[in-house]
Amino acid sequence: MKPLFLSSLHFLRRHRALLRYILLCISISLILLATVVFSIDRWVSWQAEDRIIQSSEQVDYFEVAVVLGTSKYLGRTLNEYYAHRIEAAIELYQDDKVDHFLLSGDNAHRSYNEPWTMKRDLLKANVSEEDIHLDYAGFRTLDSIVRAKEIFDTDDFLIITQKFHCERALFIAHSYDINAQCLAVSGPTHHSGFSIRFREIFARTKAFLDLYIINTQPKFLGPKEPILPNPASSASRTISNG
């Protein structure tokens, strides 16, 4: 055992300069990586600043609002992220500031269906069923935003979610030439949300890679299912009826 220790010590002494160089390279790489991640995070926040609406009172009018899904419950506790999004949607509808909702979320299995859960709560608040549209393939924020344009044929809409999520959603929307704004609703009041914000930093880096390096597309696309009637077809019906 002792000779092995001595030989290892001898190796370290002989290659001390090489080891220092390797450690220096690793340190520089980590610093550069952290700088890139931090810069992307700040860039995502900066480019969304002028498209975030801070309160429902500041919302003018949108034909379509996209409500981004999340789980209704965390264990047996109501998820405040979910609750505030639904409350804001109901308030906007009752104030005649939104005509249609696109509820976009995960539909992983029969017992977990984010769009249907949101629909059920909106129906309880007397939102008309014909004004509710479901996107069961909103597995990620990118899917939800891109499908709103490519499948549901709307590129001018309001997004409803928390501020940190607004910034990433708007970053994605901007890269697809979607004219979106986002209502930043409240988050949980009983904790700081630090862990969520920490994960968001890396989610933004992944969004950057998806958009500018990998060119990631939504998991599912398909034929258009327009939320709003085609103005041209509506006009032709009016003329023929006249």
Image (cartoon, helix red, strand yellow):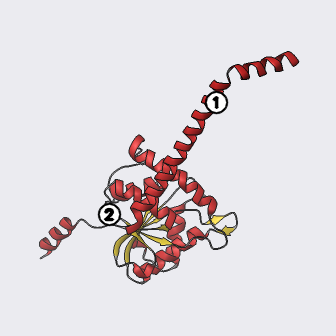
Total numbered labels: 2
Instruction: Say which of marks 2 and 1 sits in front.
Output: 1
Determine the residue positioned at 46% across, 52% down: 40
- The residues bearing labels 2 and 1 have C-alpha atoms spaced at a distance of 51 Å
Determine the residue positioned at 11% across, 76% down: 242
Circles 2 and 1, Cβ within 8 Å, touching? The answer is no
Query: Of residues 107 and 75, which is closer to you in this image?
Result: 75
Q: Quadrant of residue 18?
A: top right
- In this rendering, the answer to whether 226 lies above or below 27 is below
Query: Of residues 134 and 239, which is closer to you in this image?
Result: 134
Determine the residue positioned at 66% across, 69% down: 191
Structural crowding at the residue carrying mark 1, measured as other residues with C-alpha within 10 Å and reported as few (<14), some (14–19) or many (≥20): few
Q: Which residue is mark 2?
A: 179
- Lower sequence index among marks 2 and 1: 1
Q: What's under tag 1, amino acid-wise?
A: Arg
Query: Of residues 52 and 130, which is closer to you in this image?
Result: 52
SS at circle 2? loop
Residue 15 location (% of width, % of height)? 67, 21
Structural crowding at the residue carrying mark 2, measured as other residues with C-alpha within 10 Å and reported as few (<14), some (14–19) or many (≥20): some
In the image, is 13 to the left or to the right of 92? right
Q: What's under tag 2, amino acid-wise?
A: Asn
Q: Which residue is mark 1?
A: 20
SS at circle 1? helix
Q: Which quarter of the figure is the N terminus placed in? A: top right
Residue 7 shows which numbered tag? none
